[in-house]
Image (cartoon, rainbow, N blue to C red):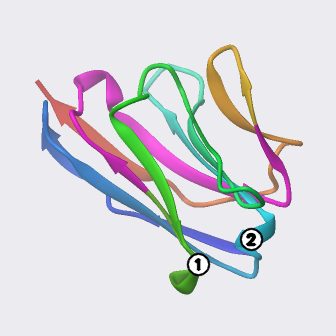
Amino acid sequence: VQLQASGGGLVQSGGSLRLSCTTSGIILDWSAIGWFRQAPGKEREGVACFSGTDSKTYYSDSVKGRFTISRDLAKNTVSLEMASLKPEDTGVYYCSADYAACAVKNGAPLLTPDPRYWGQGTQVTVSS
C-alpha cells in the first residue's frame, strides 16, 4: 500500500488549498481515509475522515464548515478541500488509510483501529 500526499503550499489567511492523497494497493470502498496535521511543537491531530463503506464524513470542530473531504474512486484519490484558511491551520498534513472505521474522540476524527498506512506529508503554511 502506498499513499502520496500533495497539494500543500503557502497561502494567505482566508485563502484556499486542495490537498490530494493518491493511493495504490488498497481498496478505497472498504477503507477509511483520514487527514491529519501536525503543527510545530504540537501533537498530531485528526482533521477529517472519509468512511469508505458508507461515504460518511467526519471533521474536527476546528475545521468543520471550512474543509471538505471527498473521494474519487476512478482516480484512487481522496482530497481535502480547505477554504477560509487561518494561520492556525499551518502544519504538515498527512493522509492515512486502512481497512478501518472512522470515529470521533474528543472532537477530532480518527481511524480505528490505528491505521498502518501513511503518506509522507505535505506542508501547509497560512500567513496572516
Q: Mark 1 and mark 2 in contact? Answer it, CB < 8 Å.
A: yes
Q: Position of residue 108 (x, y in %)?
A: 62, 24
Residue at 25 percent across and 51 percent down: it is 17
Position of residue 71 measured from the top left corner of the image (x, y, whole percent):
54, 65
Look at the image and give the residue range highlighted in magenta: 80-102
In front here: 3 or 63?
63
Query: In terms of image quadrants, where is residue 7?
Result: bottom left
**Residue 4 highlighted magenta (yes or no):** no
Which label was assigned to residue 21? Answer: none
Q: Mark 1 points at which residue?
A: 73
Secondary structure found at label 1? helix
| Residue type (three-letter) at the residue carrying disc 2 | Asp
Q: Residue furthest bottom?
A: 74
Can residue 90 be found in the magenta stretch? Answer: yes
**Circle count:** 2
Image height of 73 relative to 66, above or below: below
Q: Quadrant of residue 91?
A: top left
In this picture, residue 66 sits left or right of residue 102: left
Judge whether 62 appears above or below 82 on screen: above
Which of the two labelled residues, at mark 1 and mark 2, occupies the earlier sequence position? 2
Extreme residue in the top direction = 106
Residue 48: x percent and y percent?
A: 55, 40
Q: Identify the residue shown where x is 34% and y is 29%.
A: 89
Q: How crowded is mark 1: few (under 14 residues within 10 Å), some or many (20 or more)?
A: few
Residue identified by numbered label 2: 29
Decide if residue 21 is in sight here: yes
Q: Quadrant of residue 43?
A: top right
For image coordinates 81% across by 67% down, the residue present is 30
Label 2 packing within 10 angstroms: few (<14), some (14-19), many (20+): some
Q: What element carries label 2?
A: helix
